[in-house]
Amino acid sequence: MMRARYPLPTDLVALVSFDGRVYPNEAKPWDRLGLDERARPLETALEQWFSFATGKHTWVSVRGATIRGLISARRRAKRSAWEVEVLIDADEDRRVISSLFSQMLAGVTRQGAERVFLRLSSDSGAVKAAREAGFFPYCRQTLYRSRQKAMPEATELKLRARARGDLFGIYQLYNQAVPANVRAIEGATFREWQAALEPWGRRPADFLLEEEGVISGWVRLLSGGIARLQVLGGSRNVPIEDLLSAGCLRLAGAGVILCLAPEYDAGLALALERLAFRPAADYVLMAKRLLKPAEELVPETTSTAVPVN
């Protein structure tokens, strides 16, 4: 009999050693992209799966005493938006992954989730299963990777650090730069956009380009051995390549810089290639909007009714 349940601490050993191999994580959250899971499989498995013991937002599929699959979800910026962080399918039976999706969606709905996001490799076998579970593919992305052998030329571009009151101005820039079909999923309103901002693992730094009092460029970056960079905007006066160069200069000590280019932003992809970035992987972004549970109506008795004249 196959069933989905919360994990136990002993499941970690079963997952790491299942059939003598480590199964890959099909989910591709932004803060895990670019990490080589093949180089140190046991270490990677321990790092990704150590939180299973709590079982708070993780579900496993079991048949008897055998672990057949696992799914884990986490909040994004707000409790209304969640994302699949880990998805492992160790069984050819399609009911396994279907059961995992079903249990996860029910669980996060009880936690107040209104939307769930999922990033998968474009060629992942989990894409079909996710669609069958109600996830809708709404955008494709290419991961660009740069090993900085040569730095971009210094730019005179003046960026300022983001201030507390800038978030709505960034959202206005987002509305101008991102097509309506993507905004409908990610940020139909300011509240939804805020909630759906992706985790970066650590706190990123934000820099803004402001022209005549209007935010026209946003550079978000995270330093480290594998640095991460996100750029939005650009204008006639300041092309997006200048924003990228400014971000790269602030990440001068990084060995590798990663940047995601959505399919709708061909200018960003071209600018990345001009700066010696090369495509490393292709992904599909998926999302599912959840129905809010209806509140139960409580009948009012005559004795407690207040008459109105």
Image (cartoon, helix red, strand yellow):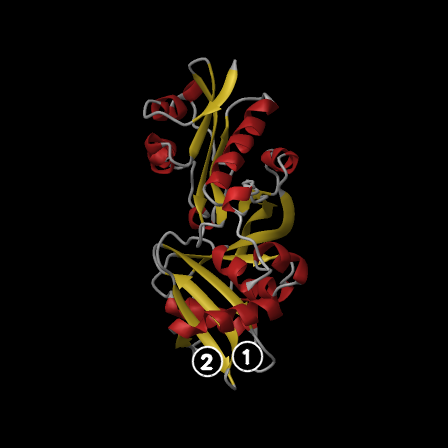
- Above or below, 231 against 33 in this view is below
Is residue 182 shown left or right of residue 148? right
Question: Which quadrant holds residue 228?
Answer: bottom left
Tag 1's secondary structure? loop
Q: Amino acid at mark 1?
A: Val
The residue most toward the front is: 309
Looking at the image, which is closer to me, 275 or 84? Answer: 84
Q: Amino acid at mark 2?
A: Leu
- Above or below, 14 against 294 in this view is above
Residue on which disc 2 sits:
157
The image shows residue 90 at horizontal and vertical percentages of: 50, 24
Q: Residue at x 44, y 68 (%)?
A: 247
Is residue 48 shown left or right of residue 188? left
What is the CA distance from the residue labelled 2 to the residue labelled 1? 8 Å
Q: Residues within 10 Å of mark 2 (few under 14, many from 20)?
A: few
Residue on which disc 1 sits:
238
The image shows residue 126 at horizontal and vertical percentages of: 59, 34
Q: Residues within 10 Å of mark 1 (few under 14, many from 20)?
A: some
Q: Does any portion of residue 162 appear in the rendered image?
A: no
> CB of mark 2 within 8 Å of CB of mark 1?
yes
Is residue 185 shown left or right of residue 83? right
Tag 2's secondary structure? loop
Quadrant in the picture for the C terminus: bottom right
- Above or below, 285 against 205 in this view is above
Decide which of tag 2 and tag 1 comes sooner along the chain: 2
Looking at the image, which is closer to me, 195 or 40? Answer: 195
Q: Residue at x 43, y 43 (%)?
A: 74
